[in-house]
Amino acid sequence: MNWLSRQSFLGPNSAKILKSARIGIVGLGGGGSHIAQQTAHVGIGKFLLIDPDRIENHNLNRLVGGTARAAWRRARKVKIARQLIKGIQPRADVEIVCDVWQAALDKLRECDVVIGCVDSFGERDQLERFCRQNLLPYIDIGMAVTAVGPEYLVAGQALLSMPDEPCLRCVGVVTDERLEEEARNYGDAGEQPQVVWPNGALASVAVGFLMQLLTPWHAAPLSGAFREYDANTNTVRESPKWRTLGARKCPHHPSNDRGDPSFDIRLCSDGGSGVKRSAALWGRIRKIFSRS
Ligand SMILES: [Zn+2]
C-alpha cells in the first residue's frame, strides 16, 4: 500500500504533486525543524534547506531532530534537518546550504514555495521582498515571549504572503520601529526566549497553508492568510487585522518590483529555463496569482 494512502483526501494526484514540489526552508532552528519534519511526513519530494548556524546545547529545548550528541559535536542545523527528512524519506532530494540565504538566490528561485523561519525582522522583510520579486509564495512564522508585569505573554503568527496581497508590513509584523531597533543592535535579533510547543503550533499552521496551496484539497485555495497564535490561551485564530485589511492591495511591494534585474519570468513557467516545475502545481499557483 502507498505510504501516503491515509491522506488521499488531499485530492487526485496529490501524492505526485507533493513529490514533485520543491520547498525552500530558510532557518532550521526551532520553527524550521518542525516544518522539515512535517513536510517530510506529508510527502514533499524536494527540499532546499538554508541555515548558517550550528546546534548548541541551549537549542535542545526545541530543535526537532536535535540530539545531545549533535549538540556536543556542534552539528550544522541543515545537516540535522537533512538527516530527519532522509530518515522518513530516504529518496528525498535534499539540498543544503550552510550559509545565509542571500548566498543561494538562484537555488531559492527554483523553489515552488519558500518558508521563512528566521528571527530577525530585517531578514524576514528582505526574504519576503525577494519572494515577491520572483512570484514565489512565501510563508512566514515567528513567535515572541514578552514580559508584561509579572507575567509572560507567549504569542506568534503565521502569514501566507502572496504577491500583491497583504505583506509582513501590512499586518504589522515588520515595522520601521522594529527595524530601527534591530539596526541599533547591528541586525542581531538577540537571544530571544523560545520554547518548543508554540513553534510546533505555528509550523503546523504553516504546513496547513502549504497543503491548501499545493494540493487539490481546497477547491478555492486562499490567496493569503494571517493567523495569530496565543500560547497563553492555547488558541489559533484568523487575525482581526487580516479582516480589516480586507481586499486592500499591498502598497509596500509595488508590482513594478518585478522589474528587478534579477527577476526572470521564465522561471515562473514550466519550460525553457531548465527549471523543472510541476505543471499541475504551477497551473494551480498561477490561478491564485491571477485572482489576486
Ligand atoms: Zn504590504
Image (tube, helix red, strand yellow):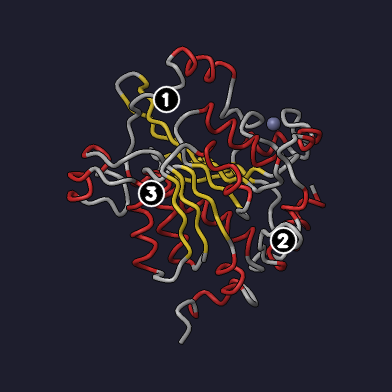
Q: Residue furthest bottom?
A: 1
Name the residue type under label 1: Ala
The residue to which callout 1 is attached is: 189
- The crowd level at tag 2 (other Cα within 10 Å; few <14, some 14-19, many 20+) is some
**Going 22% across and 49% down the picture, which residue do you hit?**
70
Which is more N-terminal, label 2 or label 1?
1
Helix, strand or loop status at disc 1:
loop
Q: Is mark 1 within 8 Å of ligand 1?
A: no
Q: Nearer the viewer, residue 292 or 146?
A: 292
Q: Earlier in the sequence, mark 2 or mark 3?
A: 3
The circle on residue 78 is: 3
Q: Which residue is mark 2?
A: 282
> SS for tag 3?
helix
Determine the residue positioned at 69% across, 37% down: 166
Q: Residue at x 77, y 53 (%)?
A: 266
Q: Is residue 156 visible?
A: no
Q: CA distance from mark 3 to mark 1?
A: 20 Å
